[in-house]
Image: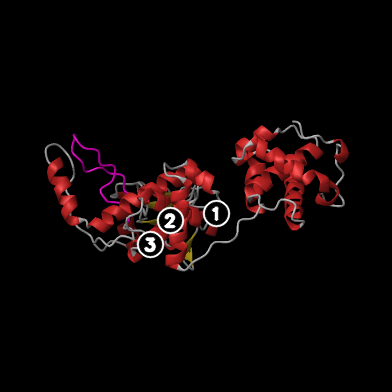
Amino acid sequence: MVMSRVTLEFQRIATCRRATFLPFGVGWKGYMSRKNTSTWGRQFCPAHPNVPLVEDYRAGDTVCPECGLVVGDRVIDVGSEWRTFADDTGDDPSRVGAAENPLLSGDLTTSIQSTGNNYEMQRLSNRILSSGNDRALVQAFSEIRLMANRLHASQAIVDRANTLFKNMTDTKALRGRSTEANCAACLYIACNQEGATRTFKEICAVCTVSKKQIGKSFKLILRALNTSVEIIKTGDFMSRFCSNLELEHKAQIIATAVARQAVDLDIVAGKVPVTVAAAAIYFTCLAMDIDKSAKEIGDVAGVAETTIKQTFRAMYPSRDKLFPPDFVPKVSLDSITGTK
């Protein structure tokens, strides 16, 4: 007896390890005609074409959540594989290694896992299979990552700093200098080039080398790579400082205008931009009657309280020229004393 095509399809589905739920009123002929329902690569349920389908990776099916129709099967899970193939003594969350770093010259090799008594063998194997340059780069990249995490820097900054350090290693211009100072200088340049400017004092706060050492490495990198960094301006710090001080956006705009005008009028000649920015924020808070002391602003900006007040006193005689023409202070500028 020749079995019909519908019967064969029914037997094939019935013997599968999963159950296929058909919508009410749809027979096997309707199922067969609607089984492979897709338009230009997009699958949809013929009874509910606008309903997003649900992918069951455990069963490998694409199912309509409204009626239970299996629209597609053999779905491939492209996510990470979390099965472990380690023994009871080890901890192996994944059977694959880390992604290959394009900045390292090492190729794919077999490594020995450090479990039990073969730790010494694994250490010797790593020394043989990895070159000295790669070991130095890995150590430097870890140092850059650690400092970037303390600065809350983005991944783009870390990648740029790693590239700068790799280029400097190839030129051998920083040979003999402190690796930590070189990493700090690369991170400082990367922050500047990515638009997240940091001061040398902020970089020094996340490492153990002095500002003088970082400055020497910074000049060598600029000279060796024939690159440059933009001149730091007061506006580079204004957004971050005002955000950390929880100031409103209007106060940030006024403080930015005050700092820019003070620089244009050559009132704060010889002052570093971060000091001018802190003094402008302090002056703006006094004019807008915002309860922020010079000490609070100095803690955020990394500037001494006395330095902020000295810069404020230099700005005060030109107070009528610093603020925008349409700015209406809540406190008379002539009555501001700057004692807070």
Q: Nearer the viewer, mark 1 or mark 2?
A: 2
Dot 1 surroundings within 10 Å: few (below 14), some, or many (20 or more)? some
The alpha-carbon separation of the residues under discs 3 and 2 comes to 10 Å
The numbered mark at residue 110 is none
| Residue denoted by label 1 | 48
Q: Position of residue 304 (x, y in %)?
A: 62, 37
Dot 2 surroundings within 10 Å: few (below 14), some, or many (20 or more)? many
Magenta stretch, overall SS: loop
Q: Nearer the viewer, mark 1 or mark 3?
A: 3
Query: Amino acid type of disc 1?
Result: His
- Foreground of the two, 319 or 114: 319
Q: Earlier in the sequence, mark 1 or mark 2?
A: 1
The alpha-carbon separation of the residues under discs 1 and 3 comes to 60 Å
The numbered mark at residue 217 is 2
Dot 3 surroundings within 10 Å: few (below 14), some, or many (20 or more)? some
| Residue denoted by label 3 | 168
Q: Position of residue 268 (x, y in %)?
A: 71, 50
Q: Considering the numbered disc 1 on the image, is that residue within a helix, a strand or a loop?
A: loop
